[in-house]
Image: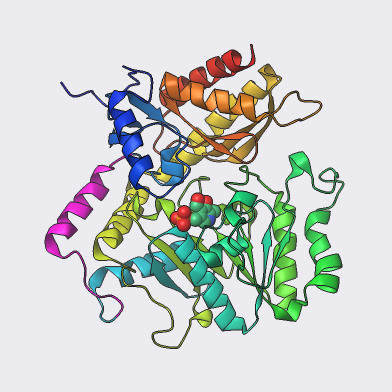
Amino acid sequence: MANSLDKISMKVEPPGPEAQKIIERDKKFMGTMNKVMPVVGVRGKGLYVEDVDGNVYLDFLSGIAVNNLGHCPPPVVKAVQDQVAKLIHFPGILCSQPLEGELASELNDIVPGNFTKKTYFTCTGCNAIDSAIKVTRWATKRPRNIAFIGAFHGKSIGALSLTCSKNAYRKGFMPEMPGVTHIPYAYCYRCPYKMDYPSCDVYCAKIIEEQYLDHVIPPEEVAAIFVEPIQGEGGYIVPPKQWHKEIRKITEKYGILEVADEIQSGFGRTGKWWAIEQFDVVPDVLCMAKGIASGMPMSACTFNEKYDIKQPGAHATTFAGNLVTTAAALATIKMFRDEKILENAAKQGAYLLKAENEMKDKFECVGDVRGIGLMTAIEIVKDKKSKAIDMDTRNKIVMGCMKAGLLTLFCGVSSIRIIPALTVNQAQIDTAVGILNEQIKLATK
Ligand SMILES: Cc1ncc(COP(=O)(O)O)c(C=O)c1O
């Protein structure tokens, strides 16, 4: 009998025998990746996912912020099934079809900014970043970019040139796109300038104007600054609101366009459509992917209409705005509205963060708790005073949780991201918090 997908049920320690066969075949025939979790998923519903050996997990990793509405949300499944039976592909690069303009018009409404916005659709996050590189270069006719240390913007050569979270991503791939300068991010728990907020007066933002634009980067040559409103892969780092405000002030002063990379932080993750709204900033360009179509491959770059690349054919891709993925995105947006998903993310996020803060009070190894809404993480350290990173303990906790039936994920050097679907309820959070507490105890005893 099939497992019911409504509670954790562990039958065999992962990877079980069926999972092992699949993992071995992947190793033999697939290009090397970084498949750190030996979980082979085959079926999912809501917050639960089943592996090939019949284990059922509570998923607090959400396909890395993709399954924001849980696994296989029924309205999205129906929209996809209906569209597949009607028309799968029609060359959007040459002709129009009814759905992509509808979605672009929805994005015009939900992306911040009291101006008309246009959108280029693509298929995955790094494509949206590459679109933003082109849009901002085209609009400004400037060659340089600024990005941040710890940033993750993707792995295509354009996006990779902005990515700066791990050396391993960049090593061996020179030459990158020229003209990118990386600047320290506002990582207050480990301030790169060894200062404290708020007495620092966001020196890490002010230094951009005071030092970099004066000595290193001629501002009149900078097309865009790429910023994750909350750094994702880099460690779920939440900057002070004042930092974002200061960055915006500098970009406006020098005519530098601000690109908000909302690929991980967007689509409701923080309890608003976009994390940048939490900081009262309106960017010029906004990139999205992951949650946009509930797991169907889609991404988008939405921008002030005045930055449109008005040269036919200069920018487009074959699968952009594909009918099936677009139908999934439209159904996703509708479900957000019908089921008050943003409200639930804000409410359950506050509940989860409170529980994580209690972990910080209880355990010496929980050095920091960060997040807004359901974009949350805990940072694991050797002890609170030294703040020394402790990857081993962090890894033990994540793997222990997985074996106990809770999926979470690493981020930064020694943090754990805890990112359930935005449809999560309080009982599921209680279960996850119980497992995390238990695994922290076991990993540090
Ligand atoms: C903030 C951010 N930008 C860009 C990307 C790249 O997206 P993709 O892996 O879909 O190319 C990611 C992926 O994790 C991301 O988190």
Residue depicted at x 53% and y 80%: 307
Q: Which residues are magenta?
A: 71-93
Q: Quadrant of the N terminus?
A: top left
Q: Depth check: 88 or 271 in front?
A: 88
The question of residue 22 being in magenta is answered with: no
Quarter of the figure with residue 211: bottom right
Quarter of the figure with residue 366: top right
Left or right: 244, with 215 as reference point: left
Left or right: 16, with 204 as reference point: left
Percent across and percent down for residue 317 are 36, 73
**Residue 274 seen by the camera:** no
Up-down: is 284 above or below 425?
Answer: below
Q: Depth check: 170 or 351 in front?
A: 170
Percent across and percent down for residue 331 are 29, 54
Percent across and percent down for residue 416 are 57, 33
Q: Residue furthest bottom?
A: 311
